[in-house]
Amino acid sequence: MASAIVLESKKQAVAALAEELKGSCAGVLVEYSGVTVADDTALRAELRKDEVNYKVVKNSILKRAAAEAGIDGLDDVLNGTTALALSAEDPVAPARILKKFADSHKDFNIKAGFMDGAVVDLDTINSLASLPSKDILLATVCNAFNAPIAAFARVIQAVVDKSGEEVPAAEEKAEEPAPAEEAAPVEEAAAPAEEAPATEEAAE
């Protein structure tokens, strides 16, 4: 009876971990021996801040869960102590945080990793670790898009402002024909003045 309960518990653990693996865009496996409780607590806090799920796993459970999730190629590293960091949305965070931690802790080593269900080598993990955080990447992309948009918006606003200033001038131009019409009687009145000398010459 006890063995049946243990077996069922293992099946549930495998199924639960398999679902986590399927729902993760990236994961990193590490050997965590030699890490103090204080350092481990600090590491978990940093991972949690970036929404990375970190846990110690049994190699046998992880092996079966990986097979169930369709991730092949981890068997060779499933020995010794193993901890797993999983991220559902940020493929960079697990590699970046764990690589930084491993660089300052000699007994903490990265074993392997995966992205989108495919195992990646250590060179790929190191390359990912060198990338900036997701927030910085998003901010960079947004700035790249917002810069020309902001410039365009300023140009449009300048045109609008300029048009607003020219509206009164346009209205004044529209009223200019009226004075021109009033000038006509003046010209007619000037006609007799031009004929006056002719009248005087005739009188002579």
Image: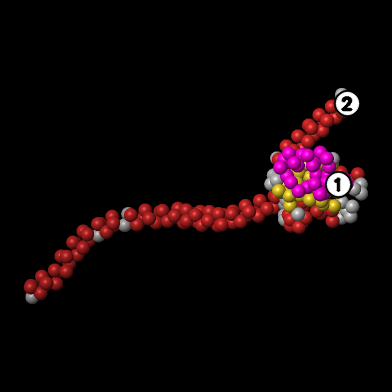
Q: Residue at the spot x=88%, y=53% of the render?
A: 105
Counting from the top left corner in percent of width and height, residue 11 is at 79, 32
- Residue 36 in magenta? no
Within-10-Å neighbours for mark 2: few <14, some 14–19, many 20+ = few
State the mark number for residue 164: none
Picture layout, residue 9 above or below residue 121: above
Residue occupying the point 73% across, 49% down: 119
Mark 2 element type? helix
Q: Position of residue 196 (x, y in %)?
A: 14, 69
- Report the Cα–Cα distance between label 2 and label 1: 27 Å
User: Quadrant of the image for the C terminus?
Assistant: bottom left
Image position, residue 26 (x, y; %): 72, 47
| Residue type, mark 2 in image | Ala
Q: Which quarter of the image is occupied by the N terminus? A: top right
Q: Secondary structure at mark 1?
A: loop
**Mark 1 crowdedness (10 Å alpha carbons): few <14, some 14-19, many ≥20:** few
Q: Does residue 28 appear anywhere in the picture? A: no
Q: Which mark is residue 2?
A: 2
* Image position, residue 167 (x, y; %): 41, 53
In the image shown, does 41 or 31 lie closer to the viewer?
31
Residue 138 visible in the picture: yes
Which residue is at 86% across, 48% downward?
Answer: 31
- Relative height, residue 77 to residue 12 (above, below): below
| Residue 24, picture quadrant | top right
**Which amino acid does the dot numbered 1 rest on?**
Asn
Tell whether position 70 is magenta: yes
User: Which tag, 2 or 1, sits closer to the chain's start?
Assistant: 2
The magenta-colored residue range is 59-84
Q: Badge 1 is on which residue? A: 79
